[in-house]
Image (spheres, grey):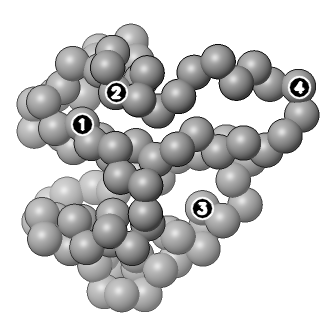
Amino acid sequence: SKTFNNYLNNKDILILQNIYDAGGKALRDISSQDLLDLIRIPNCLFIKERPRIISIIRKIIRNSDIIVLMGARDNTLSDFAHRIWKEGIIS
């Protein structure tokens, strides 16, 4: 949360999903809601469904915007990025 608070500003929009559980021995003592409660930028949302995220991006994106998708060990993230591009949201 500290990194988001230090580097994002009031014009940025951060959309969180559930934390991807790739198994293993990682601790599972934090949730996306915990992060949401700590992030201090005004435009921070939790949206569970990826189709809804695409719908929101489509409504708010402008020509000069940059979309960054981040995740750890989520092998579906590249498919999600391709879907955003394929639907003509970005070029």
Residue 26 x/y as whole percent: 80, 25
Q: Which residue is mark 2?
A: 36
**Amino acid bearing label 1:** Cys
Query: How dense is the environment of label 2, judged by Cα within 10 Å: few (below 14), some, or many (20 and up)?
Result: some
**Amino acid bearing label 2:** Leu
Q: Which residue is mark 1?
A: 44
Q: Quadrant of the N terminus?
A: top left
Residue 71 x/y as whole percent: 59, 45
Q: Which residue is mark 3?
A: 77
Badge nearest the viewer, 4 or 3: 4
Q: Which residue occupies the foreground of this view, 29 or 54?
A: 29
Q: Which residue occupies the foreground of this view, 56 or 87?
A: 56
CB of mark 2 within 8 Å of CB of mark 1?
yes
**Residue at mark 2 to residue at mark 4: CA–CA distance:** 24 Å
**Residue at mark 4 to residue at mark 3: CA–CA distance:** 22 Å
**Residue at mark 3 to residue at mark 2: CA–CA distance:** 21 Å
Query: How dense is the environment of label 3, judged by Cα within 10 Å: few (below 14), some, or many (20 and up)?
Result: some
Badge nearest the viewer, 3 or 1: 1
Task: Using residue 88 as the reference point, say whether residue 19 is left or right of it.
Answer: right
